[in-house]
Each structure stands twice: as structure tokens, then as C-alpha cells.
Image (cartoon, rainbow, N blue to C red):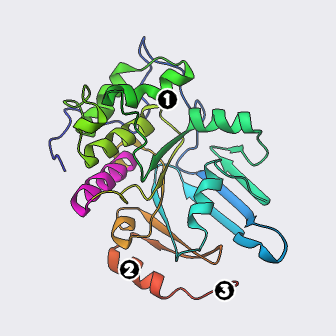
Amino acid sequence: MDSTAHPTALDPRPASPGPDAGPAASPAGPTPATPAVSARGLVKAYGRGEAAVRALAGVDVDFAAGRFTAIMGPSGSGKSTLMHCLAGLDTVDAGRIELAGREITGLSDAELTRLRRDRIGFVFQAFNLVPTLTAEQNIVLPLDLAGRRVDRAWLADVVGILGLSERLGHKPHELSGGQQQRVAVARALLTRPDVVFADEPTGNLDSTTGAEVLSLLRRSAREMGQTVIMVTHDPAAASYADRVVLLADGRPAGEVADPTPERVLAALAALSPVGGA
């Protein structure tokens, strides 16, 4: 990872809007004392009748504001389904989800689209960059699509701490995998979202580059006050988080505070079925 420090550490509080700033993404977002995301009684099944598979079987969980939380569990535990429901990418059959104090479970498709655009950042395993656009154009694309002006000072801060200042004019094919994922992280952070959801963000990266990206996500929480929720199957990746939430058979099955790879591995090994097979 590029260890060159940005001249000014990012203040965890949102910067005051400059003359080019668009409207703030969250004028009254969560405080550290309240959860950024809260879920109660979440139930989600796929299929019908005897073929139905219950992915979530009554999930109660909170995610603290300004913290980096990883979600882990065995294959089929419901971790990806949980993240997709929390982010408004999928709907639940029962239960309640609040994001930044707003219940999202009853929102229409159009309202969910606006929520994802204005209040949520995403980092996926696939970089999802537009190949014909430069790095800078990819980073500011969500603001362009929303008709919001770019806060150039905030953009400079974000790309500076991510080590992208000298790569803004490059197109994706001119960047390494790690640099492309940094662009995706910058794009997620630029709108000052209430939450960044990361779904296996290092799955397409080698271990060294993956560690760089995970360090950047951790720094975004610690230096920028950003709430990050990441799904991963990798105990080493989860160890970058402040907390690991464990799922098994669609239900919470414990958590690990201040995780290390060894502690996460031990917690996963100790999981026993708490529901169906």
C-alpha cells in the first residue's frame, strides 16, 4: 500500500460545503450513540412451498455508526442476503430495517433507488467501472447522475488519502486491479453516504492488494467516521474490521470484537447449527 500520507488527515466530521458543493447526503444522519443500520425480526425466503429456502430466519442486529463491521458465516448462512436486504437491494418477507433512522422496509422501488443513490455507497467484488471513462469521471459518476455538483475539496481529500491523485486521468485498463478497486472505494465515499456496503471487495485481488483495500476501508471508518459493513468469507479480511457478526442458518450466531484471523477462525469453527440443515 502507498504509505505516503495525505498532507491533512481527513476530519471525521463532514467538511463545510464549498461553493461547488452539492447538498449533503445526510443532513441528520446517525450519531455514534445510535446505530447506522438496525434490523429486527428479518425473515427472507426464496421459492415456495416445500421448495422454499429460508435465507433469513429472524435476524436482529445493529451496526454502529462510524465503525467497520464484517459479516461472516458458512456458505448458505444468509450473510449476502442480509447485506442485500440492509442495502435495499432486496426485500424482506417480514421484519423491519432502519437506515440512518429511517425505516426502509416499506419504501417503493423508486424510493429505494433514491435511497441507494443518495445515502448508500457500494463496493463490490467486481469493480463496476465504466471502461470509457477516466478514474475521476468514474468517481464522480453517481453525483453526475443525481444532478449534484462535485465538492472539489472533498474529492481532493478522498483521492489523496486513497493514493489516486496521480491516476485521475487514467482509464480502467490503464490501472492495476488494486487501483481500480481504489477508484470504486473513492466513488463510494464521495457522496458522503450514511453507510458503505462492501460485498467481498477483495475477491478479485491478490493478497497484498487486498490488504491495501481493506486498510483503506478501515481508515475510512477511523479517519472519516464512515460506517462500513462488509460481507466476507475470509478471516484475514474480517480481521480488519472493528467487529465481526456471525450468521448460521439465517440467524445471528455470535460476534467477535477486536477480531484477529485466529479468533475469527476459532469462532467459525465453533459454530453449530441453530436452525435447519
Task: Choose mark 3 or mark 2, whichever is in front.
Answer: 3
Q: Is residue 115 left or right of residue 67?
A: right
Picture coordinates of residue 268, whole percent (x, y): 47, 81
Considering only vertical position in the picture, is 129 above or below 93?
A: above
Residue corresponding to mark 2: 263
Residue type, label 1: Pro
Which span of residues is magenta-colored? 206-221
The answer to which image quadrant residue 141 occupies is top left
Q: Does residue 18 sit above or below 6 in this rendering?
A: above
- Give the dominant element type of the magenta stretch: helix, strand or loop: helix
Does the rendering let one see residue 9?
no
Question: Vertical placement of 96 versus 24: above or below?
Answer: below
Q: Residue furthest right?
A: 49
Q: Nearer the viewer, residue 252 or 212?
A: 212
**Residue at point 64% right, 36% down?**
115
Question: Amino acid under label 3?
Answer: Ala
Residue at screen point 60% across, 34% down: 28
* Image quadrant where one finds the C terminus: bottom right
Q: Which residue is mark 3?
A: 277
